[in-house]
Image (tube, helix red, strand yellow):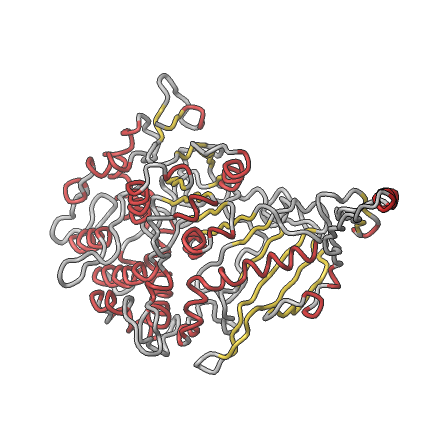
Amino acid sequence: MRGSASESTSGKEGKSVLRTESPTVSAALLAAAMLAGCTAPELSQSPAPMECGQVTTRALGIPGLTVATAAVRAASGSSATSQGYPAHCHVTGSVHPRTGIDGRAYAIGFDLRLPAVGWNGGFFYSGDGGFDGVFNDPLGTVAMGGRSNALSRGYAVVSSDGGHVSAPGQPFDGSFGMDPQARIDYGYNALGSLTPLAKKIVAQYYGRAPGRSYFAGCSKGGQSGMQAAARFADEFDGIIAGNPGFNLPKAAVTQLFDSQQLASVDPDLAKAFTPGDMAFVASRILAKCDALDGAADGMVHDQAACRAAFNFDADVPQCGAGATPDGSCLSAGQKSALKAMMAGPKTAAGEAIYSDWPWDPGIAGSEWRAWKTYLNPTLAPVSMAAIFSTPPTPGVQAFSPVASSYWRDFDASRGQVLIHATDATFTVSSMGFMLPPDLEHLGTLKQRAKLLVFHGAADGVFSVNDTIRWYEALRAGDAGASDYARLFLVPGMNHCWHGPSTDRFDAFTALVDWVEKGVAPQQIFASVDPDNPDKPAAWSADRSRPLCAYPAKVVLRTGATDLESAASFICR
């Protein structure tokens, strides 16, 4: 099955009849040209479109590319939801097979979805996530507010496994880090290699090359979005990078450091700070910062003013000697640990390793706590030991006693050395393959594409302050940076979603309007995700806010009283 914007008829069982768009010349015109003694015009024929069953390795003939499966998928669910999708041709395969230095078979795997009818002529790369090894979000739901996905909107959608396959039953498998090329594929090369080849498949399938090309991802996918902006901007017209971990190796050092701070309070990290403890800290932040934007609405929109107004030492009471934290104070150990975590790790010489973190009430969010007390001590030992250290430390697996010992004994100063190190085998450091090059000077992007970055102010994995510093550096080097790159902060939001925030928004439509209509986004409408477990009881179910293009921030309109409606607020 195949289709395009030119399809006008469809048969039973979803079979479509394609009217090709290849230019033709009538016999009469040819005859007239010949009679006039002129040379006949050259015929310019596009390749004939393919049926799904025709998509094979041999038929495509793309060097280094293997098709594993090509099958028609019937429509499922409503296309107005994130998981519903239309009928499409589902192609899986791989590119650039090789054998690693560890003896394992490697290749860059792909999952490609091709709309059966109504292809809008566009290409959409759906960003990766975590350690990769699987296909993350192959429908392209990222940054669409949960209301649809890229496949439903008519795009040909591709996703990648990042150049390796996770071991069965091991979603947090970092063993690919023992191979230097697999590290590079994970950092950026899977994206760079797959994108042009996937476009070639799309072109052969539909008989014409895709027009507009987009990328969207969050977390590790946000890091890939920044790589797309820095390394591969010539392949895309628009890029969305959500909560981008472009300094991911530094963040991994920080995650290990954070686990140690929590362990100093209680060996069981989940008991170091209860949900009530974090809700108390959030209440103290709100007491100082909530009304700074003109509305006491349980949200902090003015981070800069809050940084000046809130003093953790003075504004969060410490329990008296022998007293137990009861929701009105923190113990001395808790205050020391949380203050250290929010300041970020330092080397022995006092140099900041990563970033500090803002005091946002979203630190009471369920996902902030889940990252700090569970995911960080689970994932960071694996990523640091196997993927980001040179040389790597083998045998560190998630949930193992070895992983627990690794983070408990970790030296943050030593970690700073390991993430910048190289040797004869691993000739590119983890900062070399994870951090996009020259991120403060995006020359190709400026000429070619648009970049939209969003970041939750209460992200517990990647600090929004790090992203703000990057954007400010970009603007400092180019006064016109907002013409091609814009940053949107999401108050209260945790890692990519949730937290006490308006965490549901369609950034993709804003990006498309910017790219295709020239309408630069000044604000993006955001509401509360219906499944957000952190929505305060005092908020209405349909609370909404504008998200403002940085450095503008949300303020209450003069005379407005409805604190549940975005219409009561403006970006200033």
Q: Is residue 19 visible?
A: no
332 left or right, relative to 226: left
Residue appearing at x 24%, y 50% in the figure: 356
317 and 80: which one is in front?
80
Q: Quadrant of residue 281?
A: top left
In the image, farthest residue toward the front:
37
Q: How many marks?
A: 0
> Where does residue 454 sit, x and y in percent of width and height?
41, 44
Does 182 sit above or below residue 527?
below
Q: Is residue 44 visible?
A: yes
> Where does residue 466 sit, x and y in percent of width and height?
30, 49
Does 375 sit above or below residue 562?
below
Q: Quadrant of residue 173?
A: bottom left
In the image, farthest residue toward the top:
559
Residue appearing at x 34%, y 64% in the figure: 432
In the image, farthest residue toward the left:
321
431 and 84: which one is in front?
431
451 left or right, relative to 364: right
Q: Quadrant of residue 296?
A: top left
| The C terminus, quarter of image | top left
319 and 424: which one is in front?
424
Residue appearing at x 36%, y 41% in the figure: 492
> Where does residue 408 sit, x and y in percent of width and height?
25, 69
In the image, farthest residue toward the bottom:
103
> Where does residue 459 sit, x and y in percent of width and height?
35, 49
| The N terminus, quarter of image | bottom right
46 and 193: which one is in front?
46
